[in-house]
Image: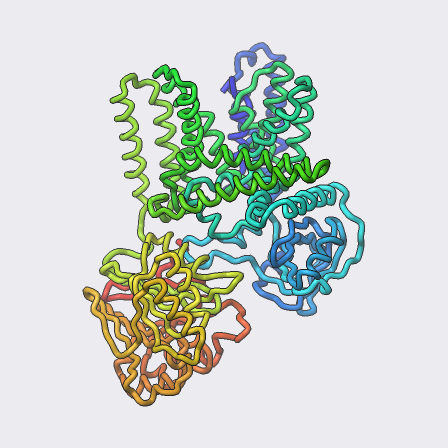
């Protein structure tokens, strides 16, 4: 540690932050620790007896840093207003305060942060320092007008609808609300019209406004010079704003193992430094170094100072200053300095994915790359090209190995062709950034030359995007690994550390290969200790997925077959199939849905199936008989035929799955079913496993319930009822509840939905029956598991 003096203090500071949930040191403890350190220093320097006691002094210093880390984290704890933080959705609110930050213009909205000092709802006034993420809608013209005239620092009053960020509502889901809270944002205010924003004071914050204007200028020039695809990519690479890159493209970047190039970090900082140094090649080293430092600082502010860029910029500046002052430095000290500065400013960054991925990548390169280089040098490779190619692979491999646990936690997949893809993409990204910077510079002095560089860049960028799209869509491009835990992370890094420490002690290739095999086997063995499938084998699992105001029921049978009854809504802005159900299936390790049941052709029931089918995740579809008067039904069946998806109409049938049975209760021969509404035509599905039974009724209403009672009578008696039409009064008659007599009732509804579902009348009716009611709007996803004898609710959050 003598060669890396900062590391021990950075580690101690991190320990102090991590132990905050367990213990909080007060200011008195900090003061006493400082006094103890001063006393120990004085004793070592002035009292002969203590001069040989260097180690106790170091221990006291480290303990002090732990206390300081803990105290700093405690001071920076997010103190969210307790009144506003209890709200979920609240219409007609008013908030006033400063425009804290304005993001670059999006296609359908403008996002800015409001540092509020007043919040009014339902005639209640809350005065406190509160931060909100504001989303401005309205017409393009109105938004553009707002975007051009508003500046950071303006004091405004906004009117709109307040809502929490999306919480973790389903297994494996990202908790957006927790993320917002971690950066001190209480929630989201949606403003439908710029007229709902009143400007109170037009005094801007000079520095923040300067950065905003510079970012806006660069963004405008990119849109002027480039097509939409390339401009969106360059906005991500140069301005750290990936909002213009679509969800599918980001997924392909993940699948092909190059998502890191979209997270502005050391790679991009290195490219910027290289561009500046090349442009100033004829100037003396001191001028080049100073300009490079200022250029990197400018780039850091341009990108909004994300941790990865801050880390890379600090490291680069430390290295440049050490070089021009003839002082030695190393990657570990530079990394520790950068981490310490970031964590002093914002201790919560230790929990940020960007911080974790960025620092683990560079740390792994610093540790693993020299080791690989050591063994490569033993082969005495004569070809410089081959040697550099191998070493390039080594850097990429080291970074991917170091970030592997975090990649699995946050993305749930690992690319098996990432090394090859990086070999193509990283140099191409360097070229794209260089051409982009050159085109921006020339656009100021010679616009015709700028267009030439821009056209070249568009060709390169589109080629790169096509290559990534092709590679990312290959079935073998990535492996899905679900439910990777913190325990798995610890095991991985523990055995990786043992491997790195031990490998140089082994001389023969056989011994090294044996050590490598030993490490891999132990990682797999120990990682499996905490493995417990959420949906257990040989049991029936039924999960009501929270898709907001809609239905989606996932079923896993004891024979491993799967079914999905409805798939939630899909709109231009949010697709439950793409954003909720597919990630959930990946998390649960389910490759394909064997039976997809579309209860009826309403968007909040069948919409999500489109994405599932496009992604080849559904084998067979069951649906109501086609209604030729509904264009959406005609389009859906045409879509099924185009995608070669087999489908079957509901018509009084049953299926035997090992020891489970599925009954379709709809009977097209019954004369009473003619002229029923789309809702009343919903598929009626009963599932039986051992002593447990379930009934799913879609949006079926009173007419349909009467038909079921007449046709099936006591066969309707079940343990679990999926309450019809989200708990509306149009379903669940007293007679129907009497015949079904459910022990458990599941209501699938959106939080504070505009329809007022579920109706209190229906809830009272179910309670009178003695039913235990589960609601997705209250609990999120609901999971019931049965072994054929007993049925119980499982708390998936644990």
Q: Is residue 205 left or right of residue 138?
A: right
Q: Is residue 681 visible?
A: yes
Q: Nearer the viewer, residue 94 or 612?
A: 612
Q: Nearer the viewer, residue 614 or 479?
A: 614
Residue at screen point 56% across, 42% down:
458
Which residue reaches farthest left?
A: 658
**Quarter of image, res 449:** top right
- x, y percentage for residue 644? 32, 63
Residue at screen point 19% across, 64% down:
658
- x, y percentage for residue 503? 34, 22
What is the number of callouts on the image? 0
Q: Is residue 646 above or below residue 342?
A: below
Q: Is residue 180 left or right of residue 746?
A: right
Which residue reaches farthest bottom?
A: 671
Residue at screen point 37% across, 73% down:
599
**Quarter of image, res 766:** bottom left
Q: How is the image coloured?
A: rainbow
Q: Is residue 784 visible?
A: no
- x, y percentage for residue 516? 30, 28
- x, y percentage for residue 260? 49, 39
**Quarter of image, res 163:** bottom right
Q: Nearer the viewer, residue 133 or 470?
A: 470
Q: Is residue 25 above or below residue 155?
A: above
Q: Is residue 89 above or below residue 101?
A: below
Residue at screen point 42% across, 53% down:
172
């Amino acid at each position: 540690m003598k060669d890396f003096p900062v590391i021990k203090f950075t580690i101690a500071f991190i320990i102090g932050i991590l132990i905050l949930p367990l213990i909080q040191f007060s200011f008195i403890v900090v003061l006493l620790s400082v006094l103890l350190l001063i006393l120990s220093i004085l004793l070592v320097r002035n009292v002969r007896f203590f001069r040989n006691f260097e180690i106790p002094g170091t221990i006291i210093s480290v303990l002090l840093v732990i206390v300081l880390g803990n105290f700093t984290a405690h001071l920076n704890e997010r103190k969210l207003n307790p009144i506003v933080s209890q709200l979920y959705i609240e219409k007609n609110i008013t908030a006033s305060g400063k425009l804290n930050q304005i993001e670059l213009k999006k296609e359908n909205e403008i996002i800015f942060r409001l540092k509020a000092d007043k919040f009014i709802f339902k005639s209640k006034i809350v005065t406190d320092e509160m931060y909100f993420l504001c989303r401005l809608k309205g017409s393009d013209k109105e938004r553009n007008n707002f975007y051009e005239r508003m500046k950071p620092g303006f004091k405004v009053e906004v009117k709109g609808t307040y809502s929490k960020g999306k919480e973790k509502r389903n297994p494996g889901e990202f908790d957006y609300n927790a993320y917002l809270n971690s950066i001190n944002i209480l929630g989201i205010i949606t403003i439908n019209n710029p007229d709902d924003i009143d400007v109170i004071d037009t005094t801007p914050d000079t520095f923040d406004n300067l950065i905003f204007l510079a970012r806006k200028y660069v963004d405008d020039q990119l849109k002027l010079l480039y097509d939409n695809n390339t401009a969106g990519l360059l906005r991500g690479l140069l301005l750290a704003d990936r909002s213009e890159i679509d969800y599918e493209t980001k997924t392909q970047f993940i699948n092909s193992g190059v998502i890191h190039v979209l997270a502005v970090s050391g790679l991009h900082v290195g490219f910027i430094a290289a561009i500046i140094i090349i442009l100033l090649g004829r100037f003396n080293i001191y001028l080049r170094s100073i300009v490079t430092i200022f250029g990197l600082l400018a780039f850091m502010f341009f990108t909004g100072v994300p941790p990865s860029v801050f880390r890379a910029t600090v490291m680069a500046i430390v290295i440049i200053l050490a070089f021009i002052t003839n002082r030695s430095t190393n990657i570990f000290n530079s990394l520790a300095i950068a981490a310490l500065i970031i964590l002093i400013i914002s201790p919560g960054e230790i929990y940020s994915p960007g911080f974790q991925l960025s620092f683990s990548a560079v740390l792994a390169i610093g540790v693993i790359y020299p080791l690989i280089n050591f063994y490569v040098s033993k082969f005495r490779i004569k070809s410089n090209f081959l040697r550099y190619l191998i070493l390039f692979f080594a850097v990429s491999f080291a970074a991917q190995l170091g970030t592997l646990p975090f990649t699995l936690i946050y993305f749930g997949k690992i690319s098996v062709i990432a090394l090859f893809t990086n070999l193509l993409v990283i140099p191409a990204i360097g070229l794209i950034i260089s051409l982009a910077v050159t085109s921006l510079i020339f656009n100021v002095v010679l616009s015709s030359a700028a267009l030439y560089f821009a056209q070249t860049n568009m060709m390169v960028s589109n080629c790169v995007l096509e290559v990534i799209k092709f590679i990312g869509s290959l079935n073998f491009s990535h492996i899905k690994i679900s439910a990777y835990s913190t325990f798995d992370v610890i095991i991985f890094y523990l055995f990786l550390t043992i491997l790195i420490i031990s490998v140089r002690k082994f001389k023969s290739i056989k011994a090294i290969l044996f050590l490598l095999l030993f490490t891999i086997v132990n990682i797999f063995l120990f990682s499996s200790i905490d493995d417990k499938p959420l949906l257990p084998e040989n049991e029936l699992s039924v999960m009501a997925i929270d898709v907001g105001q809609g239905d989606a029921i996932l079923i896993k049978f004891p024979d491993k077959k799967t079914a999905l009854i409805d798939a939630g809504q899909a709109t231009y802005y949010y697709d439950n199939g793409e954003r909720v159900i597919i990630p959930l299936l990946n998390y649960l390790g389910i490759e394909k849905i064997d039976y997809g049941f579309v209860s009826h052709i309403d968007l909040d029931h069948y919409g999500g199936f489109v994405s599932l089918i496009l992604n080849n995740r559904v084998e067979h579809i069951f649906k109501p008989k086609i209604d030729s008067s509904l264009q959406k039904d005609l389009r859906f069946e045409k879509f099924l035929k185009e995608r070669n998806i087999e489908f079957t109409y509901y018509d009084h049938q049953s299926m035997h799955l090992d020891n489970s049975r599925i009954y379709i209760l709809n009977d097209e021969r019954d004369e009473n079913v003619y002229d029923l509404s789309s809702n009343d035509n919903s598929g009626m599905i009963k599932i039986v496993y051992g002593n447990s039974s379930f009934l799913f009724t879609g949006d079926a209403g009173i007419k349909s319930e009467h038909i079921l009672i007449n046709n099936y009578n006591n066969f309707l008696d079940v343990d679990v009822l999926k309450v019809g039409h989200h708990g509306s009064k149009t379903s669940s008659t007293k007679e129907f509840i009497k015949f079904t007599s459910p022990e458990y009732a599941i209501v699938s509804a959106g939080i504070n939905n505009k329809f007022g579902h579920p109706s209190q009348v229906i809830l009272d009716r179910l309670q009178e029956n003695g039913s235990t009611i589960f609601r997705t709007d209250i609990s999120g996803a609901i999971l019931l598991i049965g072994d054929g004898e007993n049925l119980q609710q499982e708390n998936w959050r644990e």
